Amino acid sequence: MVEDIPVEYMGSRLRIKEVASITTPEPRVILIQPWDPAAVPAIEKGIRESSLGLNPANDGHAIRLTIPPLTEERRKEFIKVLHQKMEESRIRLRQVREDVLKKVQNEVKAKTAREDDLFRAKEELQKIMDDLNKKIDEMVKKKEQELMNS
């Protein structure tokens, strides 16, 4: 939920998970403990500027985020975020598929693989892609149900 929020730290743009450990000591609390206490203000600012709408509590050494009970509007916002993450996953999968196909095509051009290998690779990759997309759809449906019923 918060691990990929960008923060400005020591002149670099880093994600929270790169500058702190993130734990959930209680079901509705996220505890962010930076490895360097000087990063606390930057993390706090990054969270405030994010689209999550959470109010961080800074104790000087760590940041606590208390997750309020979800309203219908909030649930729909989280579902939108869920769908964005799903689309990002699918885009990444397509990129990986294209990279693999390019490698096989290069091997065919270099005569280290046959044309049949290229067609077999395309078929196998498509099966894998179909399975992964199906799993992504199942996970999204399950998470949507969890969000709407909690």
Image (cartoon, grey):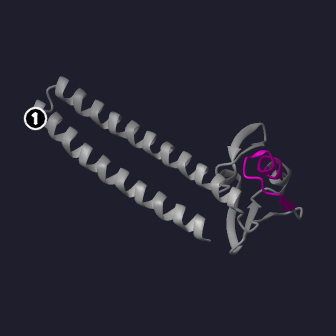
Note whether 47 is above or below 109 in the view shown: below
Three-letter amino acid code at the position of disc 1: Asp
- In this image, 76 relative to 136: left or right? right
Is residue 51 inside the magenta stretch?
Answer: yes
**Residue sitting at the far top:** 109
Residue 105 drawn at (x, y percent)? 23, 28
Q: Which residue is mark 1?
A: 116
- The residue drawn where x is 70% and y is 56% is 73
Q: Quadrant of residue 72?
A: bottom right
Residue 51 drawn at (x, y percent)? 73, 47
Which quadrant is home to the C terminus? bottom right
- The residue drawn where x is 21% and y is 38% is 122
- The residue drawn where x is 89% and y is 61% is 60
Note whether 16 is above or below 95 in the view shown: below
Which of 34/120 is in front? 120
From which residue to which does the magenta span run?
Answer: 43-57
Which quadrant is home to the N terminus? bottom right
